[in-house]
Amino acid sequence: MPVKLNENLKYNFLAADEPPVRDERVGGCIAYCGSCSCLQGDFKSGCAQAQNRRFSQSGGCQLGLAVGIINSLTRAVTIIHSPLGCCSGLAGSAGVRKTSRLSRGLTAEEQTFIHTNMDELDVVSGGLDKLKRAIRYADEEYHPEVISIVNGCVPGIIGADIDAVVRELEPQISARLVPIHCEGFKSRFVSSGYDAANHGILKYLIRDPQEYPQLTEEAQIKYDFQKKFRTSRTVNIFNVGSNSNGDEVELSRLVSALGLIPKVVPLNSTVDDLDHLGEAALNVSICATHDDYLLGHLKERYGTEYLLDVLPIGINCTNTWIRKIAAHFHLEKEAERLIEQENKELREAIAPFVEELKGKKIFVGGGETRILTTADFYKSIGMELVGIKAHNLDRFVENLLNDIDDPNLTVEVAAGQPAEELNTLSKLKPDIYIGHAGANGWVTKLGIPNIPLFGAPINYMGYSGAFELARRAARALKNTNFSKNIGKYVGHPLTKEWMDLDPNENIVQGSRF
Amino acid sequence: MGDFIERSKFSCALGGALSTIAAIPKAVPIVHASGGCAAALSGTYNLSAGYRGVGYCGGNMIPTSNISQSHIVFGGEEKLVGQIESTLKYIKGDIYIVVTGCQTEIIGDDAVSIAARYRDQNVIGVNTPGFLGNTLRGYDAILSALVKGIITKKEQKDPKTINLLGIVPGHDVFYRGNIAHLTDILSKIGVKVNSFFGDGESVEKIKGYGDASLSVVLSETAGQITAKQFETTHGIPFVTTELPIGPKASERFLHLIAEKLGIEKEIVDQVVETETKYFYSYLERIVDVAADLDFQRYVAAFTDSYYAYPIVDFVSEELGWIPHFVSINDIQDAKKQEAYAKKFEALTSRTKPQVIFEDKVGLAKKKLRASWPYNHNQKYYDALGPLYIIGSVVERDLANDYGAGFLTVAFPVSNRAVLNKGYAGFRGALSLVEDLLTNLVASR
């Protein structure tokens, strides 16, 4: 019996300066190598959650994910209170923000960010004076709507109090200040970064919306009625950093097709958009791993019901996503008509790709919800799923995990850790690999053709996304010379001893985290 | 100490260390830090250095001790020991370099001593916490550790071998191409180059670098510490000069090296003559279009000190463009700033550039705006144009605002892919001209 994904989770953390990390709030598994049936058992018993690994490689940092959310806001300046390395990648993504915004029809904005550039002296003093000057500078030079202060490991360990700085400067600064606690060392789950950013949005950015005075009593009544009606039909779709404008357009189209009003938040939003977050009848997640914290707290604040279920990737999951939304508004019949029509059109359209892909072996690696739904799609069109690899596994995918009917399916849980993945792939020998950024290069070096699991300009979600997934996989297999050449002439640095090892031998039970 | 920086064009010392290690053939980093540092910093140089890639053992492949909460309290040394041992078993490498992040340095883990236990298995340790400084500091930390720790002492020096320093991998997006061009022209005057990162280098060869009789540092801000380390440990003197771009600068460069090494002037003259002829035999191709379309430009450069003078010198002295404005982001010391600004007095252009030192991008832009009389809507206005901005991808929108030509040379460079290209020497300068002019004719 499928359970509610956030059964028993509490959403009452806004009084605190920072949210609890996922390790405490949600928990989950970060290291596993084995079969699907074993994992299903070990996950229930809690053994999977107590595993760690011996040889470990670099994974992710929650700071990057928190910045991904908070830095996307319109007219925002991000201040990174840390040495220069944290977020140094922003330097080279000057055009990424711009193209992402232009693709959504938003005004082009430059990527403005400031490092407090903490040095050895600041490790002693905390560097808060520099931070204050940086905040004033950002406000005076750019007049942004939001100035976020992102806390790195150094101030986190020495206990520099950025919240006090925010409280002190708030009356003097015209922008809304938001401190974000996302120190990398604090959590083994990078998804803690989502909560960190959302905590900041909830606690510091959302304010009561300004109501504009109406001229006459009659106009006021009309206005209030319209607003009430609009709110009763509005569905907030919560976007994530890895989705494209194409995804947002497609999901909005499907919600509109039910006669509802879609609104896409919170990435790329203005503070005004955030202020009006409460004016919706339903908040819909597209990825539970991303935003249960946000949706749960919005329910506490506005009483807005929310839907935390499946990621709308592939035919089955998109169907489910639509059905769940429709059920909230008692639009079941409309939903079935929409689904029938869409499925028919899509199946005809992907038929030639299905013909190409049928029986081909596929391996999917990346974030838990995305890989399980993506894998489900490829399986549903007749490909042979040989394995999956998740960054981590937690309660948000328990239903999806239990739905897998292949007990022998290879499952790996590892954030990054390409060594384990390459080991597994060299044994499974898939025809094609679909993976998270950072992994695909190594898979190419192993000689296996691949396509990215997500990407800014690419549509993955909804029915049009399913079409793209099929189309891309079929295209990638039309010519695999690049990966063949790279596999032959470049290769990877792992020893034979490692590649011959059963990767499960690298997993240890209960080592201190 | 350093103030806050807007849109920093550096990562931290650990970032510089990882970028440097990635450029050493078959070198494997072992990072003692939290889990995200290594992949994120490696990613910075993968994506912002002309798509240089993560390298032999970079990105997520980097072995990391993955320090978290409990280690901050109880210490992470034990975890590091496990990482070193398993890395030695599972990753092929000619050298393993343990580097540290902020977290483990603050809690006082002694990673360098732990690494020293594995010295016989080609492991060395280096302190590289982010708060130590920027990319350049990390570069020097790694190289000076190699100089001290693995380069063999040699009494017998080769009179015609030099160590080339100051070219920071990744931070100089064109590092491999530049090294190749410099190695090439130096070989023409009989000089062998120890470059750490050039074609055909290896850890084995690096161990023999103690035989050089001179270190040549091409930067005021990177390589100085390493050069001093070469001097104290191996008795190798050093000289600081600029990255030579174009015939005139290359001529100066070759003469300087020749003089230091006691090579006859005639040999250099011969090479300079041949190479200059070669340079102009190709430059000739653009003479017609440059003249017909009036390609002379005002130049504003926004780079680090490694590229600022060499680039401005080239466009002024070889192309006859007008050096108007130079913004440099990596020198903080007032005396050093003054000395650096003085270099530009040597330019023969009638207009000498305004030289500023600024690491806040917004202020640098404002200062460019203030460097030229405002337009008061008068009928005739002598505008700052046509302008060419040479900088990093950060200045792209600025170039747009001015309707200026635009080329990314300094880090970060994310709008072009760079493989074996370099701008140094005689032949590299031809590539620079190609790129400068390509952007002027791109819309034709």
Image: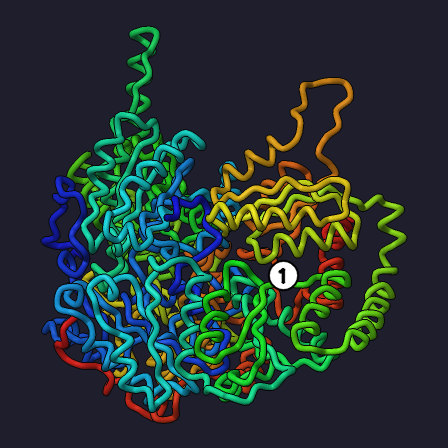
Looking at this rendering, what residue extends furthest in the top direction? A216
Residue B383: x, y in percent?
A: 72, 30
**Residue depicted at x 69% and y 76%:** B186
Residue that appears at 58% across and 64% down: B240
Q: Is residue A23 depicted above or below B383 in this figure? A: below
| Residue A279, quarter of picture | top left
Q: How many marks?
A: 1
- Locate residue A265 relative to residue B237 in the image: left or right: left
In depth, the one of A471 and A122 nearer the eye is A122
Q: Amino acid at mark 1?
A: Glu
Tell whether B363 sits left or right of B198: left
Residue A169 versus residue B153: which sits nearer the camera? B153
Q: In which quadrant will I find the C terminus of chain A? A: bottom left
Instruction: Note whether A86 is above or below A252 in the view shown.
Output: below
Q: Which residue: 28% across, 45% down?
A: A127
Q: Report which residue position mark 1 lands on.
A: B242
Question: Residue B330 at what x, y percent from top left?
Answer: 50, 52
- Residue A359 makes an appearance in the image: no
SS category of the residue bearing label 1: loop
Q: Is residue B91 left or right of residue B421?
A: left
Rendered-image quadrant of the N terminus of chain A = bottom left
Report crowding for label 1: few under 14, some 14 to 19, many 20 or more residues within 10 A (C-alpha): many
Residue at image coords 70%, 80%? B187
User: Does residue B383 appear anywhere in the picture?
Assistant: yes
Residue B199: which quarter of the image?
bottom right
Q: Position of residue B189 (x, y in %)?
A: 74, 78
- Residue B243 vs residue B34, the one in the foreground: B243
Q: Chain of mark 1?
A: B
Please give left or right for residue B37 compared with residue B136 in the image: left
The percent coordinates of residue A235 (x first, y second) are 32, 39
